[in-house]
Image (cartoon, rainbow, N blue to C red):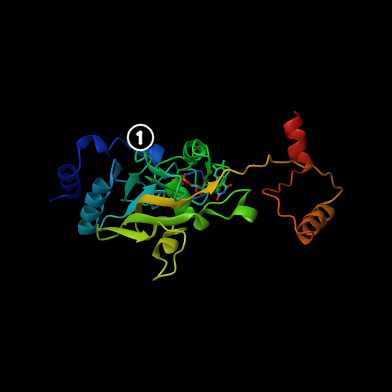
């Protein structure tokens, strides 16, 4: 059977997009410099079974798959290669579980970072990884890129919060990796291996993340003005040497300040 016939037979037709204009809109991320090829199809998956069916057909026909979250990546990782199927996971956007007692959440990969943060905040909980793209980027994309933002020095990056995941492997098998517990010492850290793998090892279809309690004390902001980068850097080193770990440190140069003022 030809590839597109096999695809249509295995997936609901409303999940398959062949319109070149629509496919073009999905064919690259935010890295304008990175090359992007021409996909043969775009599949908008709704669940892990559809991902599994797609991967099995692609494996049989030797067709590459490029998974994609929100396409906010800055490295071209979600860019199409010629002849690939683009697999859009932004439609798998349900928060499946928030467990305040265990301080964890289970989400589909297309859940937007800020949506997860808002949902867990209603339970007094906090998901710390905060890439500046958090209003748009997905937990699946954050996991596949090991995203981290300004809070990472104090609170860590995505890798520090992923406990486990479900993944469709290159053979189309759905496997469960990692754990739901705080302590995890047994066996190979295969979930950890998938964090930062940029879609090269398989397709992540579910993620279990660790949560913290929302901080009680109000945050305090301190602003300092420095004559040079060197003195600003010395202030950072002195802060660390004094045993203070700020939740975020941001250097804003005069050009940015001027732009903000304007
Ligand atoms: C304005 C802006 C600010 C940003 N700030 C930050 C920042 O502070 N910190 C930071 O780390 N990054 C930042 N980024 C980069 C980007 O937002 C992150 O890399 C983000 O994690 C990508 O998420 P996404 O959902 O857009 O994934 P995409 O860009 O769609 O995909 C990223 C990679 O993950 C793979 N992938 C996506 N979903 C899956 C899945 N379910 N299974 C397997 N592989 C998958 C893709 O194939 C690709 O390789 C920023 C980007 C922008 C545009």
Q: Nearer the viewer, residue 114 or 258?
A: 114
Note whether 17 is above or below 147 in the view shown.
above
- Mark 1 is surrounded, within 10 Å at the Cα level, by few (under 14), some (14 to 19) or many (20 or more) other residues, namely few
Q: Is residue 216 visible?
A: yes
Q: Residue furthest left?
A: 1
169 left or right of 157 in image: left
Q: Is residue 183 left or right of residue 214?
A: left
Q: Is mark 1 within 8 Å of ligand 1?
A: no
Q: Residue 238's quadrant in the figure?
A: bottom right
Residue depicted at x 48% and y 54%:
145
Please name the residue shown 78% across and 42% down the image. 222
Quadrant location of the C terminus?
A: top right
| Residue at the limit of the structure toward the front, as seen here | 101
- Quadrant of the rendered structure where residue 19 is? top left
Q: x and y percent of residue 105 in the render?
A: 43, 46
Q: Is residue 17 visible?
A: no
**Mark 1 lies on residue:** 22
The image position of residue 223, as x and y in percent, is 79, 42
Left of 175 or right of it: where is 189? Answer: right
Question: Measured along the vertical axis of the image, is residue 191 above or below residue 211?
Answer: below
Indicate the position of residue 66 as horizontal and vertical percent values.
36, 51
Q: Who is closer to the viewer here, 228 or 86?
A: 228
Residue at (45% x, 58% y) in the render? 195
In the depicted structure, whether residue 152 falls above or below residue 94:
below
Question: Residue most toward the right?
Answer: 227
Report helix, strand or loop for mark 1. Answer: helix
Please provide percent x and percent y for residue 249: 71, 48
């Amino acid at each position: 059977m030809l590839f597109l016939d096999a695809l249509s037979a295995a997936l609901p037709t409303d999940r398959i997009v062949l319109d070149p204009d629509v496919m073009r809109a999905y064919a690259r991320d935010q890295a304008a410099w990175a090359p992007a090829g021409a996909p043969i199809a775009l599949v908008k998956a709704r669940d892990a079974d559809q991902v599994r069916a797609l991967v099995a057909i692609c494996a049989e026909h030797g067709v590459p798959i490029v998974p994609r979250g929100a396409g906010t990546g800055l490295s071209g990782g979600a860019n199409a290669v010629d002849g690939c199927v683009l697999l859009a996971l932004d439609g798998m956007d349900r928060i499946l579980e928030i467990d305040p007692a265990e301080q964890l959440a289970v989400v589909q990969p297309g859940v937007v970072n800020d949506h997860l943060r808002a949902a867990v905040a209603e339970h007094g909980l906090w998901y710390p990884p905060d890439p500046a793209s958090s209003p748009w980027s997905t937990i699946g994309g954050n996991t596949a890129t090991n995203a981290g933002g300004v809070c990472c020095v104090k609170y860590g990056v995505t890798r520090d919060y992923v406990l486990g995941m479900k993944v469709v492997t290159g053979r189309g098998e759905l496997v469960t990796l990692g754990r739901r517990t705080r302590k995890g010492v047994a066996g190979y850290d295969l979930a950890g291996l998938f964090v930062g793998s940029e879609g090269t090892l398989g397709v992540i279809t579910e993620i279990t993340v660790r949560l913290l309690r929302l901080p009680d004390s109000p945050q305090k902001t301190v602003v300092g003005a420095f004559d040079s980068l060197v003195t600003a850097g010395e202030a950072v080193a002195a802060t660390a040497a004094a045993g203070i770990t700020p939740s975020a440190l941001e250097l804003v140069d005069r050009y940015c300040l001027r732009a903000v003022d304007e």
